[in-house]
Amino acid sequence: MAGAAHFIATARTDGRDWLVEAAEPLSALQLRSGGELPGIVATPALLELVRKSRKYGLRLARAIQAQDDSESVTAWVEIEPDEGGEGCRIGLTNWQSAPLNAEDQAAVEQRREAIERHVAELTARLGPKQEVISVDCDSEELADVAKRLREGQGTRWTDLVEIAGDTRHHDLHWRLLDGAKLVIPGSPRKWKAVLLPLGRAEPGKAGFDLLFVAEEPPAAEVKKKEPPKSVFSTAIGRDIAPVLRQPISRIIANAETIRTQLAGPLSEEYSKYAADIATAGEHLLALIDDLADLEVVEADEFDTAPDKIDLADVARRAAGILGVRARERDISIDAPKAGESVLAVGEFRRVLQILLNLLGNALRYAPEGSQVWLRAERDGARARITVADQGEGLSEEQQAKVFEKFERLGRSGDGGSGLGLYISRRLARAMEGDLSVESAPGQGARFTLDLPAFDDRRRMRR
C-alpha cells in the first residue's frame, strides 16, 4: 500500500472478509470485540468498508467509530483492494480511544450476536426445551446435518448433532452448550455451536436461535460449486448483466475515489457531485438485478422450493437488515417481538426478498420521524405478514396499478425501477400465496403477503 510508512497499524483481509493479518492496536480490538484472528472482521464499521472496497474494487478512506467491552475507539482508515479482488489491505492512523461506560455492555453483546449471525452457515430456531422448530441452511458441508435436524423437528438438537468430547450433553444448560465444539462428518473444518436465547425477562423462555459457525475459512476443495445454469437464464441474466456490471462498478469506484478525495483535495460542491454519480451507479446496478429477477419469475419453468418457515422470524430479519436505513431517516420499525411465531409454507429466500422490498418501499415513502409496522398473524389455513407505514397513502386508482410492471405512480426521483412490487407478487403467487394492498390518501399503505399456513397434517408441495 502506497505511503504505508505513515500508518500506525496495517492489516490484511481475504476474499471472505476475514482479518488474516493485523498489527496492534487493531488486532487487540478484533479480539476484545469477540472476533478471532484469523476471523471475520469484528468491527461493523470496518467490515462495511472492507466489503464495499472489495466488491467495487475501489480505494476508500474514512473515519470509523468502534467499541469493544472496555473502550470506544475512533480512527482514520484507508483501504485498498488487492488486484485479484480476493482481499484488501488496511492502514490506520489517528487512533484515539476512551473508556466505555458500563451501560454500553449490552451494545457489545448485540454486536457479537450480529457478527455470529452474519458468519453462521446454518441457523435453526429452537423451542424453550431446545427442540428443533425450523432450519435454514445453504452450506453444502452442512446439508446432511440440516436434513437430520429438519427430519427431527420436535427433538432436542443435541440428540441429532454430535458434540465433541462430551457424552453428557443431554443434561447441559444452554449456557454450557453456547460455544460447544461440533463434529460434522465429512467436513474438514472445525465448527462451534452458538446459542442465542430469546426472551428478555427470562433468557431462553421464548426459545433459542442455534447457529453453526465455522472457526476457519473453507479450504479450496470445500468451496461451493457453481450453481447450474437455469434453463431460463436468458439475455439479461446470462449475457447483458455481466457486461454492464463491470463498467458501472468502475464508474462507482471512480466516483467514490473522487468523493473521498483520495486523488487530491476537492471542493465540497464537486465532492457532492461525485456522491450523486456513485448513487446513480448503485441504482443502475439495482435495476440490472431487478431485470434479471424479472426474467426469472416470468419464465415458464420458474418454481419455488416451499418449506416450513416462520413469518415473524423473517420479518425480524428484514427489520434488522434495513435497520440502519431506518435510523438514517429517523423512522422506527415495530417488528414482531422475540418469541412471536407464525408458521407458513414458502421459500425462505423469496419471502425475505418480498419483505425487504415492502419494507424498503415503506422506509422510502414514509415521512421522517414516523413508524413502520410489521405484523404477522394466522387466519385459519392462511398465514399473513403486513407491512404498514404512515406515508401519503394510495388512491383507489393507484392501488389498481401499483403491482403493474414498471409502474412507479409518477415518482421519478427515487431511483426505483417500478419492478419490485410486480416481482414480489409473482413470487407470492408462485408460492400459492398473494400480495395485496389496502390504503387511502393520507392514511399510509398496508401491504400484506398471504401464504398457506403450516400444518403438520398438511403435506407440503415438493
Image (spheres, rainbow, N blue to C red):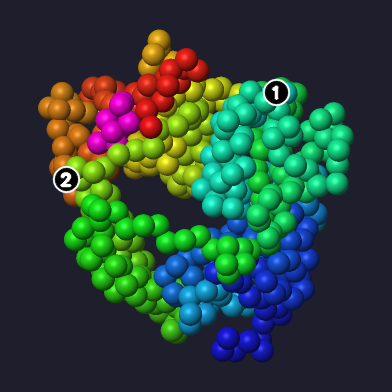
Q: Quadrant of residue 79?
A: bottom right
Compute the Cα span from label 1 to label 2.
Answer: 46 Å
Q: Residue 40, how many percent across, how many down?
A: 64, 61
Q: Using the image as rendered, state which of residue 95 and residue 339 is in the foreground.
A: 339
Q: Residue at x 40, y 57 (%)?
A: 227
Q: Which residue is mark 1?
A: 128
Q: Amino acid at mark 1?
A: Pro
Q: Is residue 165 visible?
A: yes
Q: Residue at x 25, y 48 (%)?
A: 296
* In the depicted structure, whether residue 15 falls above or below residue 128: below
Q: Residue at x 29, y 54 (%)?
A: 230
- Split into 4 quadrants, where in the image is the N terminus? bottom right
Q: Residue 166, how many percent across, how many down?
A: 86, 42
Q: Is residue 430 magenta?
A: yes
* In the depicted structure, whether residue 175 falls above or below residue 443: below
Q: Which residue is mark 2?
A: 406
Q: Residues within 10 Å of mark 1 (few under 14, many from 20)?
A: some
Which residues are the magenta region?
A: 426-433
Q: Residue 289, how many percent across, how many down?
A: 30, 55
Q: Main secondary structure of the magenta part?
A: helix
Q: Using the image as rendered, state which of residue 155 and residue 22 is in the foreground.
A: 155
Q: Using the image as rendered, state which of residue 449 and residue 343 is in the foreground.
A: 343
Q: Secondary structure at mark 2?
A: loop
Residue located farthest toward the front when viewing the structure as drawn: 186
Q: Residue 314, how many percent across, how many down?
A: 48, 34
